[in-house]
Amino acid sequence: MINSKKMYPLYFLLPAGIIYSVFFLLPTGMSFFYSMTWWTLDDWEFIGFDNFIQFFQEPSLRIGFRNTLIFAFTTMGGKVIIGLLLAVFLCSKIRNKNFLRSVVFFPVLLSTIAVGITFKTMMHPTTGLINTALAKIGITGPNWLGDPSIALLSVAMTDIWKGVGIATVIFIAGIMAIPNHYYEALKIDGGNAFQGFWHVTLPLSRPALNTVIILALIGGLRTFDLVWAMTGGGPGFSTDLLASIVYKQYAGGFYGLATAGNVLLFLFVGLIAFPIFKFLNRKEVDL
């Protein structure tokens, strides 16, 4: 009998270990170190936790934390609900199924900056396509990106549109992995389509659901490019996220301070995502 633990020598792992160390562990360790320094490209000085103390005194930090949480959970919820409904529809017996799946996935292939600039133009309060279309049916559209009360939601809707294709593909893979005999047993018991969704599709798609939740949540917590392309964090600080605050520090030449912000963002994402990941994994069921 072959001992599986001795099937491959440990040095087989060496190339992957070197790549992982050079491109992941080393930059992470350097980020922690430089977050405690004042540094430029050719000089550095160790200053302890001063950067972290100064970062926590940033006036817009509380708004950034709040906006980041709102944005992450709103986009995650939208992608889960819309992605699941689209996946169920695209797994049903419809014509041109593959073409429709391609259409849903198409926004994922687009540049985030290009999407941001395009939607910024479409959401212009007077000349934008959205408000022009609403005016045709007698509705006065809002100032999507200029009104602080809805600007963050407008960016979130754009992010959902762009990212729902990934969620849909993951859900489709999860639904297609469900053995057909579960649905056949439900039909024998007189179950209808909704009961099939509620009692078979939804619980047995749990691994796909968990994957979408974690990916969408982490993506939302570290979002920067779409927000910056559409609003630049404004109006005021109404759409400022943690990542955009960090970017402003880098742009101002405060590299050590910005690195400390990145470390805090890393810890912030981990503290939220890891407990949710552990919780969701306990709820999974075997097919």
Image (tube, helix red, strand yellow):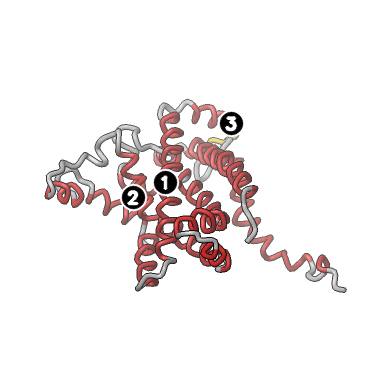
Q: Which residue is mark 2?
A: 158
Q: Which residue is mark 1?
A: 75
Q: Which is in the foreground here, disc 3 or disc 1? A: 1
Q: Nearer the viewer, residue 93 or 216?
A: 93
Q: Secondary structure at mark 1?
A: helix
Q: Quadrant of the C terminus?
A: bottom right
- The residue drawn where x is 28% and y is 52% is 117
Q: Secondary structure at mark 3?
A: loop
Tell me: residue 166, above or below residue 147.
Answer: below
The single residue placed furthest to the right in the displayed view is 1
Q: CA distance from mark 3 to mark 1?
A: 38 Å
- The residue drawn where x is 18% and y is 52% is 129
Q: Quadrant of the N terminus?
A: bottom right
Mark number, residue 47: 3
Near mark 3 (Cα within 10 A), the count class, few <14, some 14-19 or many ≥20, is some
Q: Percent position (x, y) of residue 257?
A: 50, 35
Name the image quarter holding residue 150: top left
